[in-house]
Amino acid sequence: MKARVFVTLKTTVLDPQGQTVCSALHGLGYSAIADVRQGKFFEIALADGTAREQAQKDVETIAHEVLANPVIEEYRVELVD
């Protein structure tokens, strides 16, 4: 089983990197792009035999305490068989 964790800045937090990418895309002629938000993606392999409920709980804790800064970021966890 694998877990995927997506971490992004909260919508209320400015994203200068996303703004820079958006400006660069406009400069390349992609005028239909309205906004870009950058983030992080983590793929975590879990040991065989790990219970799904325990995996969900552990990865949620890891995402909250290690991978994301909950003050300025939000995250989403997916478990994949």
Image (spheres, rainbow, N blue to C red):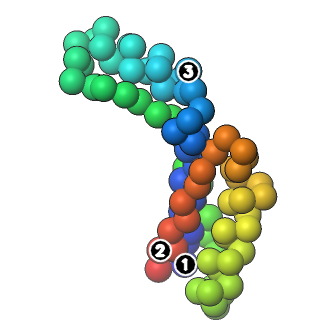
Single out the mark in the foreground, 3 or 2: 3
Tell me the CA gap for discs 1 and 3.
35 Å
Looking at the picture, which amino acid does disc 3 mark? Pro
Reading the image, the residue beneath label 1 is 1
Is residue 40 in view from this perspective? no
Residue at (67%, 41%) from the top-left corner? 72
Reading the image, the residue beneath label 3 is 16
Tell me which numbered mark, 1 or 3, is placed earlier along the sequence: 1
| In contact (CB < 8 Å): disc 2 and disc 1 | yes
| Position of residue 80 measured from the top left corner of the image (x, y, whole percent) | 47, 74
Residue at (62%, 87%) from the top-left corner? 53
Single out the mark in the foreground, 1 or 3: 3
Quadrant holding the N terminus: bottom right
Tell me the CA gap for discs 3 and 2.
32 Å
Looking at the picture, which amino acid does disc 2 mark? Val
Residue at (59%, 33%) from the top-left corner? 13
For mark 1, give the secondary structure. loop
Q: Residues within 10 Å of mark 2 (few under 14, many from 20)?
A: few
Residue pushed farthest right? 65
| Position of residue 54 measured from the top left corner of the image (x, y, whole percent) | 68, 85
Residue 63 image-quadrant placement: bottom right
Residue at (47%, 20%) from the top-left corner? 19
